[in-house]
Image (spheres, helix red, strand yellow):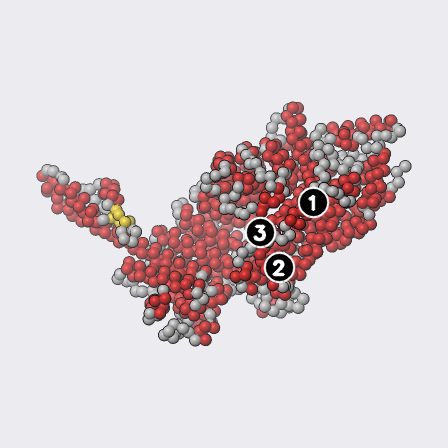
Amino acid sequence: MRYLRTSQDFLFTQLQYLPFSIKEHEISTLNQMSWLMKTAAIEMRVTSLNRQRSHTQRLLHLLLDDMPVKPYLADGEGGMEDESRSVSGFLHFDTASKVRRKILNILDSIDFSQDIPEPLQLDFFDRAQIEQVIANCEHKNARGLVVCNVKYLHRVLVAEVNALQGMAAIGQRPLLMEEINTILQYVVERNKLLQCLHAKRHALESWRQLVEIILTACPQDLIQAEDRQLIIRDLLQDVHDKILDDDAAQELMPVVAGAVFTLTAHLSQSVKTEQKQPLALPMAGQSQYVLMLDGSFTSSPGSESISMGFASIGDSSLHIILKKLLDFILKTGGGFQRVRTHLYGSLLYYLQIAQRPDEPDTLEAAKKTMWEHLTAPEDVFSKLQRENMATIESYGAALMEVVCRDACDGHEIGRMLALALLDHIVSVDKQQQWLLYLSNSGYLKVLVDSLADDDLALQSLLTPQPPLLKALYTYESKMAFLTRVAKSQQGALELLRSGVIVRLAQCQVYDMRPETDHQGMYAMRDPPVFIPAPVERYRQILLPALQLCQVILTSSMAQHLQAAGQVLQFLISHSDTIQAILRCQDVGVGSLQELASLTGIISKAALPGVLNELDMDVNEGTQMELQGHIGRFQRQCLGLLSRFGGSDRLHQFKLQDDNAAGDRVNKRDEIELAMQQICANVMEYCESLMLQSAPSFQHTVCLFTPSLSESTNRDGPRQDTQAPVVPYWHLPGLGIIVYLLKQSTSDFFSYYDSHRQSVNKLQNVEQLPPDEIKELCQSVMPAGVDKISTSQKYVLARRRLVKLINNRAKLLSLCSYIIEICLFILWRHLEHYLLHCTPTDSQDPLLSSRMSFKKGRLQDSFGSEPSLDFSSGLNRVSQHDIEQLQIEATNSFGESLQKKLLDIEGLYSKVRSRYTFIQALVRRIRGLLRISRT
């Protein structure tokens, strides 16, 4: 390459004359152009790696400039003016002086149409036999192209004629020889057709490689973002116009589809990069990190001068690209699924342009009133998304049929991308036209029924040495799409009608839970491998099913009991697995995520009254068995409070892992979030059990004994480092609730301070010290941080801060929710014990017998009291227990805790939850504790 570069400036000189004239010698000229473009691509890659900017820049100007080419110095080195000039100088408003870019002229020179020879018309030879003989005479030539050996075919045909006997054969010999010449001429034309198509494919492939090198390997600053988008737009529109022509050869579709995929990916990346650029001139009082497309920025003074929306390329250009993509998909018809695979990927990249970037949850948006949200102007993302959906819907059932068919059948990668495309379209389809088509045409039912076929393939993946993981990836795509469908009320109803929960209950793979390694939470420190361990593969199979059940329970409002009944049937069908997860032998990320999803399901499904909705004939024996299952789920969920309510293992994990970097930090965040989610789910379950089982105050079903000893023991010093675990077959005491209330209050302020600090850092990333920037970057990119530029470090630091802010916002929401439910449960229990409960050592036998009768009635009305041990826990409440409860509760629920709770309501709950709810509960609990029992 150095020789070609320094010898008469060979490459630049030759590229100047591209495209060559190909009128007479089309095949040889196309091959010459192909090898020249490949060589130029290698040259640009090498000079970019070696930082020879001037060489790369000259070639870029030559290929991309739409202005007349200026003469360059003979030695190949431009002056200072050339060095400082980038490709951004292409675009001027003097359109009269513009010329067509050379990269587009090269594409124009490749003729996508191809003349096909007329089919053989034979009088003497059988056409099918001749085609077979031609196929037998094919061989690969020097270029690797399969063509027919004309000389060999001639010998075979002449030998066949010579073998004929009789006077008739002798008389017809001239006619036979003439037909042989016709066959040979046809074969020569067919060989030329194959060679010409091969040359065009080769030239098109070389052109695609050259474009890829320009977009990926060349320094980004040589082509500014605005110019990059316009260049990609021109390339996409031209290549689409050529392939969508009626005369375009279908053999060129695969190469064109690959080029379209590459171009669309770079267009999406370029547009999103432009959107995320921090403003050069921040307004007073505003942060430098403001998205150019943020709705709050449009109302800022002086913002009119800054380009808004997708100004560099324009919405109209994006719509044209979308229409051409959809036309290309429909042009492939029933075949060419591999071509559509590239096009589905391209369409996904295009649709990502209209997705709003990840924004930090600064807790400010919730302060807007509902009217402000409803009357807010439509932002550019919503506008483009709405227009994209209108364009897609204009293609009607023809496009739906193609995508749905590919999602149900065909090549694995094609199915995955078709499912991903359906996922995205259903998520933005406000009219639910695609969901309606999926249901009415039966494709949704086909996808649900295919889970039974996936079951056998997934079972084979749990062996120590699994086969290919394609079945797992297809299953994940399918479950992700079904979960997306379930996020709407109508979608959840359609899935229930299709029997998706019943199918999941029948799958045996969920019962094949591998033995976990008992290294505890520190098992996450093992180095990652490409093929995950069997237990990780199992979690990849189970978690999507749990998430689907959870989403269906959340979305199916009108049919909630029906959905809960089916989900409960799913839990009972796999009860051994469910109970193994609830025992939670280790505290790794995967185990906690399983437990968080499972407790979320149980809190909504294993409730009184759900048994009546089961689709089965239930006799008395079966009823008791089902109640036994539900009771075990309830006991194990209550037992989780003592394990995760104190967060002792989390604190120990933090101490062990404070100095961890990279992915370990992200896993620590995930563990923290999962633990809080588990506590929130269990508390929600307790609240639901209390409200649904005994809605009146006088008939409260108590889930906790009147003992705060666990709280006082935990608050004081202790010798062991493990949290005391209450056996799950005993009812826990109210001390767990009080401790969880205190712990969540403390966690809330810790998360709130961390959230506020991260928001401040995000607003002033450029002012952070280098060591802190490096630490933030290592959380996103563990290796190679020192090799990237400062601007790229700022981008990674912002990405990490946005993720951290959103993580803390979720934790704040969970803590606030836990605090509210803890206060509610504490209030209901205190009211029952201090006002309505009659001690067992009371002197009035009539009152005692009435109380026993009342409790018996309550236990009869509660669906699973044989499993929740009320009789042993609540019938032995003495006067001393109640007095001790009042004393300990008064000490635990002191002024400092009450002040913290009211501060939380002022800081957070005022705009995020039920305003004055915490205040009302605190006031009622305080009033209960002041009542003197006589």
Q: Nearer the viewer, residue 454 or 440?
A: 454
Residue 407, image x and y in percent? 47, 43
Residue appearing at x 44%, y 51% in the figure: 342
Q: Secondary structure at mark 3?
A: helix
Looking at the image, residue 840 lies above or below residue 250: above
> Amino acid type of disc 2?
Pro
Q: Nearer the viewer, residue 852 or 401?
A: 852
Provide the secondary structure element on which disc 2 rests.
Answer: loop
- For image coordinates 89% across by 29% down, the residue present is 843
Position of 280 with respect to 240 (left or right) is right
Task: Let me know if residue 494 appears in the view.
Answer: no
Q: Which residue is mark 3?
A: 663
Tell me the kind of residue under disc 1: Asp
Residue 377: mark in rendering = 2
Q: CA distance from mark 1 to mark 2?
A: 48 Å
- Mark 1 = which residue? 648
Local packing at callout 1 (Cα closer than 10 Å; few below 14, some 14-19, many 20+) is: some
Residue 703: quadrant of the picture: top right
| Of marks 2 and 3, the one in the foreground | 3
> How many numbered tags mark residues here?
3
Circles 1 and 2 in contact, beta carbons < 8 Å: no
Q: Position of residue 591 (x, y in %)?
A: 61, 41
